């Protein structure tokens, strides 16, 4: 895979490769030197791989940076059924990317929003222990951990539970089979670039496919939220975890991050004064945190596994 420079934010980039995931074709992009450690980036909703442009621009000179449009987004295929967006399919897509990008060495996995939520599936899967060197999670908790945490909050701190529910009001809306896609298409889609700029305090690049990305990405919520919160599994992390906390994130409360401590034996938490899309609005600071974390990990002994 050749080294590439970062494309201009206003130019849509052609995929460097289209690979076979779990029954879908995935558009993949690579920057930097393949001889360097590999970072694999997984984007959230309603984004595409280009949401990482600014961050990769600060890391590609030191790492082999690989990202892809997840199923339903960008130039990857868009399955029609809700069940095609379950976490198990998303993990197998990620594994296909890892097999393509770094078949002989573990990678540093970096996820944002739903990219982080789905990446927890791999970070808690014993079968993936040799594939991941670390996992950086940004604004996206493990749904199983959240399910257990909500039960604990109900018993111990219902005020905190109510605060998080207020942050996550839109999740209930996204469960509605017809109303949610129609609402996105006819109301939210046209307003999305302006809404994103308002949330972050500055205009951010938006992929040309955002209208379809948002409509299909709602299936992530419908396929996974209710099953995982209703029947959470015990999923301790099998890899070191680096949590970057955006203090002004309107969607993810600090309590969801603190809850990771019960599930992660080797956990580092770094705070940043930023909103939800810190990976774009505060790219230099986020890049420095990731770079420093990986540098420290090189000489740090492995922590004992968390008890299940």
Image: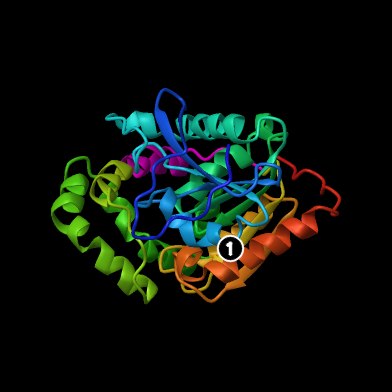
Residue closest to the eye, 152 or 263: 263
Q: Is 304 situated left or right of 45 in this image?
A: right
Q: Is 125 situated left or right of 200 in this image?
A: right
Residue that appears at 34% across and 60% down? 10
Image coordinates of residue 230 in percent, x first then y, are: 44, 41
Badge 1 marks a residue whose secondary structure is loop
Q: Does the magenta stretch include residue 235?
A: yes
Q: What stretch is highlighted in magenta?
A: 219-236
Image coordinates of residue 178 in percent, x first then y, are: 17, 41
Quadrant occupied by the C terminus: top right
Principal secondary structure, stretch drawn in magenta: helix
Q: Quadrant of residue 197?
A: bottom left
Residue that appears at 49% across and 31% down? 93
Q: Residue furthest top?
A: 23
Q: Name the residue under label 1.
A: 58
Residue closest to the eye, 110 or 224: 110
Above or below residue 154? Residue 219 is above
Image coordinates of residue 108 in percent, x first then y, are: 66, 47
């Amino acid at each position: 895979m050749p080294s590439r420079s970062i494309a201009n934010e206003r130019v849509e980039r052609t995929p460097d490769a289209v690979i076979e995931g779990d029954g879908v074709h995935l558009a993949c992009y690579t920057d930097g030197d393949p001889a360097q450690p590999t970072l694999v980036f997984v984007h959230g909703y309603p984004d595409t791989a280009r949401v990482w442009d600014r961050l990769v621009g600060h890391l590609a000179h030191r790492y082999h940076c690989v990202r892809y449009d997840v199923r339903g987004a960008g130039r990857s295929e868009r399955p029609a059924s809700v069940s095609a967006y379950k976490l198990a399919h998303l993990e197998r897509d990620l594994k296909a990317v890892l097999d393509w990008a770094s078949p002989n060495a573990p990678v540093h996995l970096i996820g944002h929003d739903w990219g982080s939520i789905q990446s927890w599936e791999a970070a808690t899967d014993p079968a993936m222990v040799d594939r991941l060197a670390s996992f950086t999670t940004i604004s996206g908790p493990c749904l199983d951990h959240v399910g257990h945490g909500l039960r604990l909050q109900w018993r111990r701190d219902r005020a905190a539970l109510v605060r998080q529910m207020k942050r996550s009001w839109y999740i209930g809306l996204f469960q509605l089979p017809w109303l949610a896609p129609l609402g996105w298409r006819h109301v939210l889609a046209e307003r999305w670039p302006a809404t994103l700029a308002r949330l972050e305090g500055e205009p951010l690049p938006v992929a040309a496919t955002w209208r379809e990305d948002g409509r299909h990405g709602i299936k992530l919520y419908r396929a996974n939220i209710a099953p995982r919160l209703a029947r959470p599994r015990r999923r301790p992390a099998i890899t070191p975890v680096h949590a970057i906390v955006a203090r002004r994130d309107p969607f993810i409360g600090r309590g969801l991050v603190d809850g990771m401590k019960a599930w992660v034996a080797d956990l580092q938490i770094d705070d940043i004064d930023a909103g939800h899309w810190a990976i774009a609005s505060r790219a230099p600071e986020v890049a420095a945190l990731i770079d420093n974390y990986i540098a420290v990990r090189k000489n740090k002994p492995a922590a004992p596994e968390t008890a299940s």
